[in-house]
Structures are given as structure tokens and as C-alpha cells.
Image: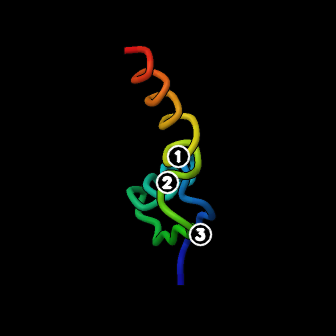
Amino acid sequence: MYDIIVLGGGPAGYNAAERASHGGLKTLLIEERILGGVCLNEGCIPTKSLLYSAKI
């Protein structure tokens, strides 16, 4: 049995699960794919890195 279940391991979900766990709650984090979400792994951050590299 869990005190809290967090759906989605993106930046907000990961942070929420971590804070709940540090607060003493038994926490379950459910993510369909990989932790970090679309922005971190496929979207915003990788795109900015590629654009920055192309300018050098």
C-alpha cells in the first residue's frame, strides 16, 4: 500500500515523488517510458543543444 502515487516521471512528477518520499510518505512513481519526460529526453533540451552545436 502506498501513501501517494505519482503519474508521470517528467520534471514535475519526479520532483513531486522525490519530495513526498523525503517527507516520509511511501511513494510510487509510474512512468510509461523513461524518467525525465519528453522535454528532457526528446524535446526542448536536446533541441537547444543541437541548435547551439550547429552555431559553433
Give the Cα distance between marks 2 and 3.
13 Å
Report, in whole angstroms, how far the alpha carbon at label 2 lies from the one at label 1: 5 Å
Question: In the image shown, does 55 or 29 lie closer to the viewer?
Answer: 55
> Which disc, if any, is residue 11?
1
Is there CB contact under 8 Å for labels 2 and 1? yes
Q: Position of residue 28 (x, y in %)?
A: 51, 72
- Disc 1, SS: helix
Task: Please tell me whether residue 56 is drawn above or below residue 36 in the rendered image.
Answer: above
Task: Give the camera-side residue of 40 and 3.
Answer: 40
Residue identified by numbered label 2:
14
Residue 27 location in percent, x, y? 48, 69
The reply to whether callout 3 and callout 1 are in contact (CB within 8 Å) is no
Identify the residue at horizontal 57%, vertical 47% (top origin). 12
What label does residue 32 carry, if any?
Answer: 3
Q: Is residue 42 above or below residue 9?
A: above
Give the CA distance from mark 3 to mark 1: 14 Å
Q: Name the residue type under label 3.
A: Glu
Secondary element at tag 3: loop
The earlier-in-sequence mark between 2 and 3 is 2
Residue furthest right as drawn:
7
Mark 2 is surrounded, within 10 Å at the Cα level, by few (under 14), some (14 to 19) or many (20 or more) other residues, namely: many
Q: In terms of depth relative to the viewer, which is nearer, 43 or 56?
A: 56
Give the image location of residue 17, x and y in percent: 49, 58
Above or below, 39 relative to 14: above
Label 3: few (<14), some (14–19) or many (≥20) C-alpha neighbours in 10 Å = few
Rendered residue at 43%/15% (across/down): 55
Q: Residue furthest bottom?
A: 1
- The vertical placement of 9 against 56, above or below, is below
Q: Which mark is residue 2?
A: none
Left or right of 32? Residue 41 is left
